[in-house]
Amino acid sequence: MTDQSPDGFSQHEREGVYRAIYERRDVRAYRSEPVREDIIRKLLDAAHHAPSVGFMQPWNFLLISDPEIRRTVYDHFMQMNSQAGENYEGERKLKYSSLKLQGILDAPVNVVFTCDRERGGKNVLGRNTIRDTDIYSTCLAIENFWLAARAEGLGVGWMSIMETAFLKELLRIPDQVLPIAYLTLGYPVSFPDSPLLESVGWRKRENLADLIFDNVWGNVKRFTGSQDLPTPQVEPIVSQTIVERMNHLTKPRGSLGDLEKIILRIASIQRQDFPSAQKKNIILFAGDHGITEEQVSAYNQHVTAQMMYQYIAGTAAVNSFARSNGIDLLLCDVGVNHDFEGATGLLHRKVRHGTRNFLRESAMTREEFEIARKSGYDAVHSLSHCDLLGLGEMGIGNTTPSAAIASVLLGISPEDAVGRGTGVGNTALERKLNVIRNGLALYKSAIASGEDAIVCFGGFEIAALQGAIEAAFEKHIPVVLDGLMTGVAALVASQKNPGIRSILIAGHLSAEPAHRPILEALGLSPVLDLKLRLGEGSGAALAMGIISNGCSLFREMKTFEEANIHFAENEAATT
């Protein structure tokens, strides 16, 4: 089976198309930097190549740069938006009034798409019975523009809360021309993980299976096999220049095994021809868990705080590994049941003094989850420079919520997910299993996503790990995962945004049973398999040393040509 049909796209090209589709967002907040005119023209050319019925090409594009016109449009929008808000009551009205639904003034580019309803003359091929195909064709041009913008790292917003007659008069648009869309364009503050109205709970995405009918309306189409669409796999595209250099280094091709794949992966994530691991960081997030009340761990909860002091003092395993491999260690308290007061050796980002016992109530609120996630996100953005990021965690009892989350996301039984964690005996292991079984039954109807599972089971450090991974993806930083907890966080993050898988590297394979299926679900092979179950980023630190060596090798090793070595391969040995 070939990778493509004779006229089809390559695997990477197909992934790029689907990535643009799935990651397109209606953007409302923009950064101030301008968009180059050659890029604007490139996007408009993509719009101009949209399909149109009868090849009528009914569109025109009005670029709005006059600040007075923009201000007038903005004022009109605000008036119409206020009126629209009166359609809602109570909490929904409050939610509506809190939404930023336009970027007219802060976007560097405003553009109006119009439809000339007389273009092509009175009789346009294919428009005899369905007169509005000119409008539909213009909408296809808008979609081309939008997807091309996403591929260029630009955001687009559609300002639909305004009156057509107002725009026609303001912009002196002829009678036969209809304004279809007022769009804003620019570099976004961020690309949201999900559409704004979905993320704030305004509306959920409809179930695709409910929307497909077979032959006649209402006759639901049943596809054979799985009803779930495969998650699009988005891998970084490896530059041919990097591959060629790797193949011509003074060594037999492929002789460094998987290390060669890792080197190429690092370079492609960083988007440069020579991978770099000179500036390495590990962020260790810590939090406590209310579920330790059920005696699921071999240690008491106060050990979390004691270990944090060991990290601050530089006397723990991860400190030693970090020093040996030239890694800067950043500690972050997001939920330890202890006040570190004036300690300067860590980031103070405590959401709460530990999560709640999830057998009695949800481990955290949605608001607490978002605070913890943002703490992780901000911690990565606080790094002045980072070539390679490792992640770790500390929290007595955290293998219990991690195993519960893994059971939900992977659809595996607690027996296949639960390990001995800190080294519990058989009795405690059975107690741990029962806790997870009861928790899964308790929250079965409340969990619709990985984030829901974190809210129900905990913990704050897992939510922070998710945010850190999301920030690293934005900054094109390769992420070296540690064990079970970092794997769970990566799985949640990648289910929201499949592109995140492209920056992930599995530092090692943990002895925890759920870790292997997590890595398989992420499509990752571990750098190391030492049966570690220490946590705290120790496995990531060890792997980062190997990865750093590989990056240095690629930079320092000569190609045969650079070394002035000329040879002929032994034909008898290669046939």
Image (cartoon, rainbow, N blue to C red):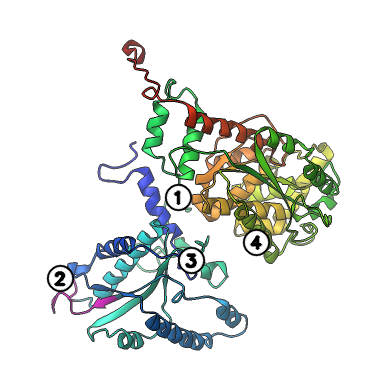
The label nearer to you, 1 versus 3, is 3
Dot 1 falls on a residue whose secondary structure is loop
Q: Where is residue 147 shown, x and y percent of the image? A: 37, 61
**As drawn, 192 above or below 332:** below
Which residue is denoted by mark 3 in the rendering?
Answer: 31
**As drawn, 228 above or below 251:** below
Q: Is residue 115 magenta?
A: yes
- Nearer-the-camera pick, 133 or 254: 254
Dot 3 falls on a residue whose secondary structure is loop
* Residue plotted at (75% across, 35% down): 317
Spatial CA distance of label 1 from label 3 is 29 Å
- Nearer-the-camera pick, 264 or 485: 264
* Residue 189 appears in the rendering: yes
The label nearer to you, 3 versus 2, is 3
Amino acid type, callout 4? Ser
* Residue plotted at (48% across, 68% down): 30
Which residue is denoted by mark 1 in the rendering?
Answer: 232
| Magenta residues, start to end | 114-128
The label nearer to you, 1 versus 4, is 1
Q: Crowding at label 2, few (<14), some or many (≥20) Cα neighbours within 10 Å?
A: few
Which residue is denoted by mark 2 in the rendering?
Answer: 125
